[in-house]
Image (cartoon, rainbow, N blue to C red):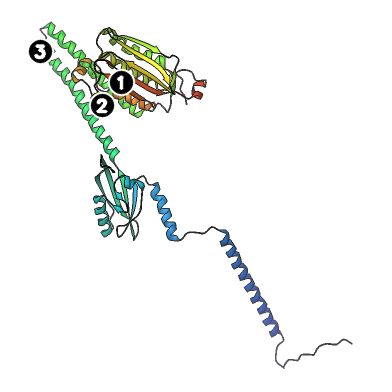
Amino acid sequence: MAEFGPIRTYPRGVDVSVDAAIAVGLIALLLAVVALLAVRLSDREERLQQPPQPEDGVRVSEALARVLAALPETSIVVSRDGQILRSSAQASAMGVVSGNELRALEVIRLVELVRRDGVTRSVEFQSLRPPLGKGQLELRARVAVLDSDTLLVLVEDLSEVHRLEHVRRDFVANVSHELKTPVGALSLLAEAVQSASDDPDAVRHFSARMQIEATRLSNLVRDIIDLSRLQGADPAKVPELLEVDRIVNEAIDATRLVAQAKDIDVVVGGEEDIKILGDDGQLVMALRNLLTNAVAYSPEHTRVSVAIRSVDGVVEVSVTDQGIGISREDRDRIFERFYRVDQARSRETGGTGLGLAIVKHVCANHGGECLVWSSEGEGSTFTLRLPLPAAHDTESPIREGETVR
């Protein structure tokens, strides 16, 4: 007969299910604790696998630095007490900042005003170009509240904008002046012709002068139009593969009558079959202007030569005359618009003062340059230096005059 342990007796009225309920509750609590520990361990492992994250203040500072670096203006971050917290390298180059202090008085005053009332302000001022103080910068500063502790200073260099505006005003003024001269002369000559209607010799004389002034006016208008077109045209966008020989011959043909009138021989020599990429009209225009000047400023019965050669990836087209030459002082300014070495001679030759400015723009448009050598009484040499196309451009099956896209 099997033996059993002692039989447990319960007092009357006690329910056996109570102990069972307590056991179930303890088991549930234990399972909940285990689950919580598992979750926390999982979170800890996940945090360990992730890279450390910067604090909020550092993250905002880095974001601000990235924003300031992307701005076109020079940026300076100043604390409420005037200490520079961050500044661009250009701030020192402009002379606005020196070390950790603001140097420009106009900016210092502006920062003080904005610090007081929090109103964004701007000011334009002039600053000497550091470090030697040679030259002057035109600057515009704008100050705004960045947050409760810092101010933001943005400085913009307006020197180039002011220079271009000055050039534009001078160009308009010069064009107006240059146009008034032939127009006024034509008006006076027309009155003279009218008053001398009974004198055939006087009529012929004045009408001849009218033709000269009309030609001068026509040339001036043509050069102004050419110059304005050059400033808006970029031959590099749709270049053509061109033969230098053909460009030279076309420019010579355009000036042949003027040269023959003074019995000036125009000769060509140098390398042949050289090709370049560019704009045919612009290059012919530039070379025609050089030949026109060479003929105009050369005595009769002399020679103008055109030489072509390639050296170090560059084609050089030189125009040499036996004319009056150019002084050293004038050589630095001859490419300026409307600048004339000899005003009286320019009136005689019908020069507009824009020919060499056009040559300069054409060379710049083609990535080249124009050099000048001259000696007074011995003549001058102007050299167009233009880059030769890469080997794969010349070896491609592009025909002469065909557009390269």
Name the residue carrying label 3: 195
Q: Nearer the viewer, residue 89 or 26?
A: 89
Q: Which mark is residue 236?
A: none
Q: Position of residue 321 (x, y in %)?
A: 29, 14
Name the residue carrying label 1: 373
Q: Is residue 146 above or below residue 198?
A: below
> Between disc 1 and disc 2, whose residue precedes?
2
Q: Residue at x 34, y 47 (%)?
A: 74
Type of amino acid at the residue the image marks with label 3 = Ser
Q: Is residue 375 in view from this perspective?
A: yes
Q: Residue at x 29, y 22 (%)?
A: 356
Name the residue carrying label 2: 333
Q: Calculate the distance from the C-alpha at mark 1 to the C-alpha at mark 3.
A: 49 Å
Q: Position of residue 155 (x, y in %)?
A: 31, 47
Disc 1: CA contacts within 10 A as few (<14), some (14-19) or many (>=20): some
Residue 272 lies in what quarter of the image?
A: top left
Q: Is residue 73 above or below residue 328?
A: below
> Between disc 3 and disc 2, whose residue precedes?
3
User: Which of the two marks, 3 or 2, is nearer to us in this view?
Assistant: 2
Q: Position of residue 335 (x, y in %)?
A: 28, 25
User: Which of the two marks, 1 or 3, is nearer to us in this view?
Assistant: 1
Asked whether the beta carbons under mark 1 and mark 3 sit within 8 Å of each other, the answer is no
Disc 1 on helix, strand or loop? strand
Horizontal side, residue 401 vs residue 256: left or right: right
Disc 2: CA contacts within 10 A as few (<14), some (14-19) or many (>=20): few
Q: Calculate the distance from the C-alpha at mark 1 to the C-alpha at mark 2.
A: 13 Å
Type of amino acid at the residue the image marks with label 2 = Arg
Residue 245 lies in what quarter of the image?
A: top left
